[in-house]
Image: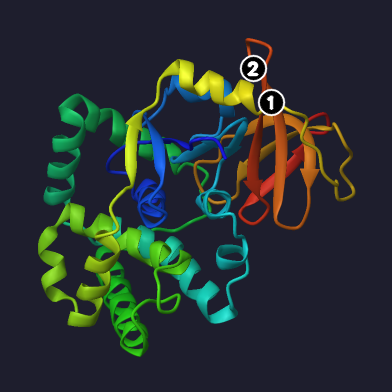
Amino acid sequence: MSVPILYHYPMSPYSEKLRLTMGLLKMRWMSAQVAAYPPREALVALVGGYRRIPVLQIGAHIYCDTRLAFAALTGNESDCLRLIDRDEALRQWAEQEVFFAVIAAASPYRAVRLLTRELGLGGLMRFTRDRIAMTRGATIVQPDGNKARAILSSFVSHLAERVQERAFLSGPEVGYLDLCCFHPLWMACRIDSRIKATWPLAVHNWFEAIQSLGHGEVVPATPEAITDAIDQEAGLFTGDIEPPFLEAEWVTMRPTDYARDESCGVLVLLDKRRAVLKRELPDGGGVYLHFPRCGFEITNRAAA
């Protein structure tokens, strides 16, 4: 496998999920830091309109979803794509309702202080405008402050029950479910570090154990390294296509919940779990964009 290249920014919670995955695997990887808000010129040519962060590149393959990225890094889809019902329900709760509750429950003063520290005053204004625009047309509803705090409290109580049964949510070792439940709480701690003092000891210990994984061996990504990675693995990639779509059909993919910007490309694989689109690059090369079916909609561009 080529050295992974992660497009991310420091305060991105979903990026922390993949950074910790690299630490879990004791992996060497390249860091391509991008802005917390568009435009991101380094990514536009690769992924088109898709705007969520992180994005993971392995050779000529670009993973536009942390679940697919985790599977690509570990080489094992069963740990993340085939969770039992109870664990899948917990993952969805953590990454949907709880994730947005973290933002709604936060003290505005402390949230602004974090954003100013990370982005500067100008960056804070641009970030705020961008996030307002990003949620236009969204299908999610962010809870108010009191409901959000109740959601977080219930989530932490549930985690306490689970990690008293065994060391980690996934079993005796850290697994995908642990990372999914960790990163919303990591964000909550970035906003207000005092929150950890309110957690049961079992949750506190679980959190610290995951955080201790670190981020593996990180080296900066250069434009040359990115291009070389694509060129070295530029072989033809194909797969089966589920009807009613056809091979080599020009399609668009976009999320169904928020940040609903679309990416376009030629369809090369479509099954129940993922869609893969090929995009031609300005220099004549090509990359393969991997999207999950769940949470995304695919449209024939000619019919759109």
**Vertical arrangement, residue 103 with respect to residue 91, above or below:** above
Check the image and name the residue furthest to the top.
283
Badge nearest the viewer, 1 or 2: 1
Q: Which mark is residue 52?
A: none
* Colour style of the rendered protein structure: rainbow
Q: How many marks?
A: 2
Rendered residue at 28%/75% (across/down): 150
Which type of secondary structure does the marked residue at label 1 adopt?
loop
Q: Position of residue 11 (x, y in %)?
A: 27, 43
**Vertical arrangement, residue 272 with respect to residue 208, above or below:** above
Q: Disc 1 designates what residue?
A: 234
The N terminus lies in quadrant: top right
Q: Position of residue 144 (x, y in %)?
A: 30, 63
Is 236 situated left or right of 69 in this image? Answer: right
The crowding category of the residue bearing disc 1, from other C-alpha atoms within 10 Å (few below 14, some 14 to 19, many at least 20), is some
Report if residue 61 is visible in the image: yes
- Type of amino acid at the residue the image marks with label 1: Ala
User: Mark 1 or mark 2, which has the lower sequence index?
Assistant: 1
Q: Quadrant of residue 199?
A: bottom left
Report if residue 104 is visible in the image: no
Is 125 situated left or right of 276 in this image? Answer: left
The crowding category of the residue bearing disc 2, from other C-alpha atoms within 10 Å (few below 14, some 14 to 19, many at least 20), is few
Q: Quadrant of residue 81?
A: bottom right
- Marks 1 and 2, how far apart at CA: 12 Å
Rendered residue at 30%/33% (across/down): 127
The C terminus lies in quadrant: top right
Is 247 situated left or right of 178 in this image? Answer: right
Q: Disc 2 designates what residue?
A: 281
Q: Position of residue 235 (x, y in %)?
A: 74, 28
**Vertical arrangement, residue 237 with respect to residue 292, above or below:** above
- Type of amino acid at the residue the image marks with label 2: Leu
Q: Position of residue 10 (x, y in %)?
A: 28, 40
